[in-house]
Image (cartoon, rainbow, N blue to C red):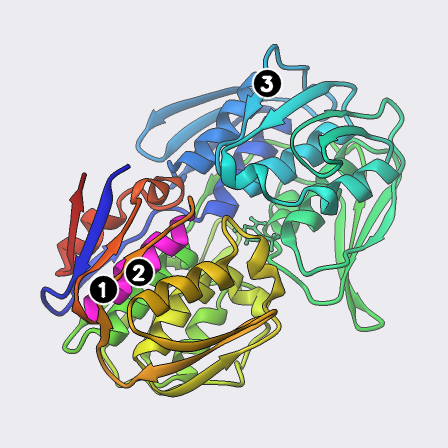
Amino acid sequence: MPSLISSPRSPLNGTVKVPGDKSISHRSIMLSALAVGKSEVTGLLEGEDVLATAEAMRAMGARVERIGEGHWVVHGVGIGGLQTPDNVIDMGNSGTSTRLIMGLIASHDITVTMTGDASLRGRPMGRVIDPLTTMGATFSARDGKFLPLTVTGSQNPLPIDYTTPMASAQVKSAVLLAGLNTPGVTTVREKVATRDHTERMLKSMGAEIETAEEDGLYVVRLTGQPELKPVNFEVPGDISSSAFLLVAASIIPGSDITVENVGMNPLRTGIVHALKAMGADIEILNERTLGGEPVADLRVRAAKLKAVSELPVDPSTMIDEFPVLFCAAAVAEGTSRFKGLEELRVKESDRLAVMAAGLKANGVELTEFEDGIEIRGAGGKVKGGGIVATHLDHRIAMSFSVLGQMAESAITIDDAAPIQTSFPVFIDLLTGLGAGLKLAR
Ligand code: S3P
């Protein structure tokens, strides 16, 4: 378990690209595996989570091959063509792989047993088990809702009309993916629209899928059993990975960086708006479209950040970026208050509790609530000197790597290994820009 020591070195300067978007990378492999014929993916994130998806789709019969850096070829089996794997599939740390693949299995006549690491085995699966059971799948899960679990797909799946009880693109996508091999129209309704990569990608592959706003809800209707045509997916850079750079360059005085090719799907850009509301200097340059998604280059210069309490965006548009936003709040001037964040308690770790513990260990004053946190900003460097327990959560490790750059004494992150799940080049990339990060055993 390598620990990571983060301390100030120099302002960040330079131009970089971050690896491919994790959500889009997962979906590009899964959907290509269901197309008829050969698809290509470029810019694929080669982090452990996406590799778990690739391995699972292979185990169910698709040919998934790496032909170059971020360049993959997938020979799909067609909708209905997935096979029962000959072993348990291990989803590692990846909730997205697990929940979306549960959806795929639910309408195939196959049986699959899934497990994962200690973090994933603690995450709630009831949110997908419930709607997929209504569609006809059967589950046997530890305590009814945790991995390891075995899912047997239905031979005669039923389309459902489902309103998601929480803002979750994983739940929406699991139901839609089950709908792919279900005759009739599967409908998902969301109170707040979450990331819509599944919808965009299915449309590009020729599926009959419609989105609308009805009675204040975002509604998706998918007609089942289309023939998905293979396409070439170009994966944009991950805005969730970029977020660590946006915050780092904003808080380290004298910084000036450009992050190129960042995915700017409007349901993902909350972090840019939140940081701007705190006074960040972020310029959005060269806006264009890549593979059906908006992308841009982001130039970030250091700025004096001030506290924020009313976020100008819905939390779902930046749900994975709160840990690093809390670090921005810790160095900002004034008290920030974030509420309505109960979903953070069921991520790779309980991100409210784990962030609160890590921030406190480094001298940050705060109050934790059931659904949020209040952070009293230092208006400059935090004390630091503490050890952060990451609890197998990549975003905790990366958030405190950023905060250490604005700490009077170095911050120690107990385990750097989880960074491999989503941003394998994080340490090299940040160090290359000027950050002070050192691995230790
Ligand atoms: C994701 C959806 C989000 C997000 C996760 C990726 C996706 O999860 O936190 O990292 O790719 O659909 P929820 O659906 O649980 O909010």
Q: Nearer the viewer, mark 1 or mark 3?
A: 1
Q: Name above or below for residue 160 compared with residue 259.
A: above
Q: Position of residue 134 (x, y in %)?
A: 87, 39
Q: Residues within 10 Å of mark 1 (few under 14, many from 20)?
A: many
Q: Residues within 10 Å of mark 2 (few under 14, many from 20)?
A: many
Does the magenta-highlighted stretch encompass residue 398?
A: yes
Q: Residues within 10 Å of mark 3 (few under 14, many from 20)?
A: some
x 50%, y 70%: residue: 270
Q: Name above or below for residue 336 compared with residue 100.
A: below
The residues colored magenta run: 393-406
Does the magenta-highlighted stretch encompass residue 175?
A: no
Marks 1 and 2, how far apart in space?
Answer: 6 Å
x 26%, y 58%: residue: 401
x 38%, y 24%: residue: 66
Amino acid type, residue under disc 2 in the picture: Phe
Checking the image for residue 88, the label placed there is 3
Which residue is identified by label 1?
404
In this rendering, does residue 252 appear at all? yes
Which residue is identified by label 2?
400
